[in-house]
Structures are given as C-alpha cells and as structure tokens.
Image (tube, coloured by chain):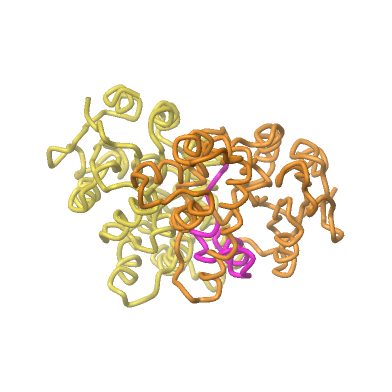
Chain colours: A orange, B yellow
C-alpha cells in the first residue's frame, strides 16, 4: 500500500479538485453579453484571465510586493484583462466587477471529487493546499460540498506555490514531518516542487482542465508515489 | 431576528464548544496514576495546567516573545506544572509528555455543540476563533465531529485573543466587515473584546466549565446581541 506513513493529504484545487475553466466561463458569460461590443467566447475569456495568474503571484514570490491574497490579485487581473475584450473597466460599476471576481468562489468540482474526498477523509486529514485564499476556498467548499477538515494554503503559509515555504510551512502547521504529508495534484510542476521539500506525491490527471486541446499534464512525468485516474480510484489505491 | 447582517459565526472553543476540564482530567488520570507518588485529583491537575494558559499567551501578546502556537505553550506549561504534583518532568520520557500534551486535541464537545453547529452551518459560515492552533482544532474537530467550514483563530491571525488583531484579522480573512461576523463565547471578557472591535456577540453560558463551584461567566454581563442557553437554542434564536 502506498502512503503508509502519510497522515494528511493536501490538495491543489484549481484544476485538480474543481473545473475552473468551465466555471469562470459560465459566470462570465452574462457579464460579457452585457458589456462586450461583439461576441466573446467565455472560455477564451476564462483562459485570458487565468493567464495573468502566475505573473501576478510571481510579484509576491520574488519579493517585489508583500503577500497579497489571491482575491485581490484576481480582481486586479480582471481589470487588466477586460480591455483585451474591448471592455473599459472604468465604465463598469465596481460592484459588478466585485461580483464577477467571485466566479472563482463558485467553481464546480470534477464529478469524482466529492465522493473521493469523503472516502479519503475517513483515513486522512484532508485540506486544500491551494494558492487560493481562505474565504475563496471556504465559499467554494460550502457551495460544492467539499468536506475539508481545515483550510490550508497560501494565505496560511504566507507563500505562493511553488515556493518551498508553501509546502514546508503547511507541514509545520500540521505538526508533521514533510514525508507524513502527501500533495495531490494534476500538475507535474506542483508535485515536483512538493517532492523537493520531502512531501509524498499523488498525481491525478485532469485532461480537460484547459479544454479539449490540452497539451500538458496529460500523464505523470516522474514516478510519483501514487498515480490514479480520479479521486475515487485514489481512495481505492491508498486503502481509504 | 438578531444577527440580520451577520454572515459568519466564529466560536471560542475551550469552554464554549468543548469541556476542556473533564477532557484533560480524563486524559491525565492514567498518567498521574503512573507517575505521581500519592493520589492526585485529575481535575485539580487540569485546573493547574490551564492556570498557566493566560500567562504563557501574555508573553506573546506583550511582544516579549514571537508568536508561538498553543501546542508549544501547552507543552512548556506541562513541564512547568508537573513539579507542583511531585513529578519531575526530566524523569518522564519525552514521548509520554508529547502524548499527554495531545489531551487538548481530544476534548469532548458539550452535548448540544454538534447538533447546534450543524444547524448554524446551514445558514452561516462557522469557524473556530480560538487561541488553539490549527492542528489542535483540526484533530479535535475530526474526533468530535465538529463540522467547521474553516479553521480560523490565533495561528491564522498570528495574535492571541483578546488582542484586537485576533478579531480584526479574522474578519479581514473572511473578507467581511466586523459587524458581519459574530463571536459566540461563554466568556464575557472575550465578547467584550470582540465588541470593541465591532463584531456582533452571542453569549452561551457554560456553568460547569470550571467544575461544580464555578463563580464566573454564569450570566451575561452586557447586552450581548444574542443570549442562548445552548447551541441548539442559539440556532433557534437566530433562525437557523
């Protein structure tokens, strides 16, 4: 049985637990219909908004700006991306932008996520280790029924993945050695960073995270401790 | 209906949600039987251990020492209190002290706590706002079935109650104004500090927290926004 010494499973969330692209597209569609001059593909808008995610966090990782929670970065990125779709954010009421920014709080889980997490929870402490902030993860979990034991992640560790502190401080908060914690993620890069910190690793492919033409993270790129097709199979694989 | 604008209920835990005195006494009894020379009342030992709680946090509040999580303070306090009961901590294996220190992770809820929280959760975000650290609260919740939406408190806010930052940073993490957050507590002092920060307040008396001779916190000392006999009545009172 893999993960023998593991006591906590921590999860990447955007892409691994929930389908951010469909969810953001769904939430953005009526907004775009109201404000864009011509037809805009809501999925393309979701991709463009998400494209600004890593550069925004990089400013924090590099030390160029103090830790700033993801809701704030998402809101800034929203204003930055709207002109690419012919929308002047200064002409949209702030409350409407605030509301659209909450799209990230209202993402649907993949079909196996809730059932798999419920089984895993019976054997392990389960918690998000996401770059999403606490209220984002809390709202999402409450709406989607994600049965987390605690909300961990960037706002608790004050560090964005893949900075080592994001993983190491999470283990510290759990009062566990890194090898007692396993990261579950659909992203090889996230797992590689966790492994460098001593965590155990579980890969679950999410081949449509980026839509039908997804080209990356379709398969494991290292010998991760566990590889499973979905969360229910992951639970079976680890005896939960 | 009280608490109309409130969106999150945050809870004091030791004494308000769980019965720390009975739980610590139960966990300490076999330890004391093994190590104490004569008969020791486990409840008296629980009281003595708890007595060192406020002074230990005061060192952090005053700035004399950096933020240190409660598990560490409890462990130090355990070593400090044992000689009062004729036990030399240097002669007890460290692993045994570590295990006894986990007594605080294994406290039983008051009989109404789980049922009341389940009802309140349907209407509000519910989370501990305890001086207990994240893994302490997580272990306790998992064992007792406390259905928290998130684990907040001192380790998230990096401040011990009743420091204002403990309340204000909790509201900030929730992305709420202070008046959208209500503290539920069995302690008038905790509620007074929360009210000074603009939070709403709910008092639930726990008249046996300190045992049969309890003299304080038997009744509300201010016009708290809600007063209820237990968590189920609290849920009724706020329409949850």
Q: Residue furthest left?
A: B222
User: How many marks are shown on the rendered structure?
Assistant: 0
Would you place residue B116 above or below residue A167 in this image?
Answer: above
Foreground pick, B165 / A98: A98
Is residue B135 in view from this perspective?
no
* B223 left or right of B8 in image: left
Magenta stretch: residue A163 in it? yes
Q: Position of residue B103 (x, y in %)?
A: 50, 51
Image quarter of the N terminus of chain B: top left
Establish if B183 lies above or below B78: above
Q: Position of residue B92 (x, y in %)?
A: 57, 67
Return the x and y of residue B152 as percentages of the image width and height. Answer: 43, 51
Residue B7 among magenta residues: no
The residue at 38%/33% (across/down) is B124
Quarter of the picture containing the C terminus of chain B is top left
Residue A136 visible in the snapshot: yes
Residue under the point 82% across and 41% down: A229
Residue displayed at 69% across by 40% down: A120
Looking at the image, residue A228 sits to the left or right of residue A139; the answer is: right
* Region rendered in magenta: A148-173
Residue B110 position in % (x across, y down) = 40, 34
Choose between A70 and A175: the one closer to the eye.
A70
Q: Which of the pair A69/A58 is nearer the observer?
A: A58
Residue that appears at 71% across and 52% down? A185
Left or right, residue B195 beside residue A127: left
B41 or A17, nearer to the observer: A17
Q: Quadrant of residue A53?
A: bottom right
């Amino acid at each position: 049985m893999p993960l023998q010494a593991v006591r906590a499973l921590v999860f990447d969330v955007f892409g691994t637990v929930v389908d951010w692209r469909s969810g953001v597209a769904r939430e953005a569609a009526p907004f775009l219909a109201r404000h864009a001059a011509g037809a805009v593909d809501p999925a393309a808008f979701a991709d463009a908004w998400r494209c600004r995610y890593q550069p925004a966090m990089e400013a924090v990782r590099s030390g160029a700006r103090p830790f700033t929670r993801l809701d704030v970065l998402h809101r800034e990125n929203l204003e930055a991306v709207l002109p690419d779709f012919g929308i002047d954010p200064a002409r949209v009421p702030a409350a409407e932008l605030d509301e659209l920014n909450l799209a990230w709080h209202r993402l649907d889980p993949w079909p196996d996520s809730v059932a798999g997490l419920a089984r895993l929870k019976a054997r392990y402490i389960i918690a998000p280790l996401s770059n999403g902030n606490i209220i984002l993860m809390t709202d999402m979990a409450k709406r989607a029924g994600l049965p987390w034991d605690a909300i961990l992640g960037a706002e608790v560790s004050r560090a964005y993945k893949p900075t080592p502190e994001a993983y190491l401080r999470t283990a510290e908060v759990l009062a566990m050695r890194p090898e007692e914690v396993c990261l579950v993620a659909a992203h090889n890069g996230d797992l590689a960073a966790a492994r460098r910190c001593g965590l155990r690793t579980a890969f679950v492919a999410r081949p449509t995270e980026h839509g039908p033409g997804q080209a990356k993270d379709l398969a494991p790129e290292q010998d991760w401790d566990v590889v499973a097709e979905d969360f229910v199979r992951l639970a079976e694989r680890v005896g939960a």
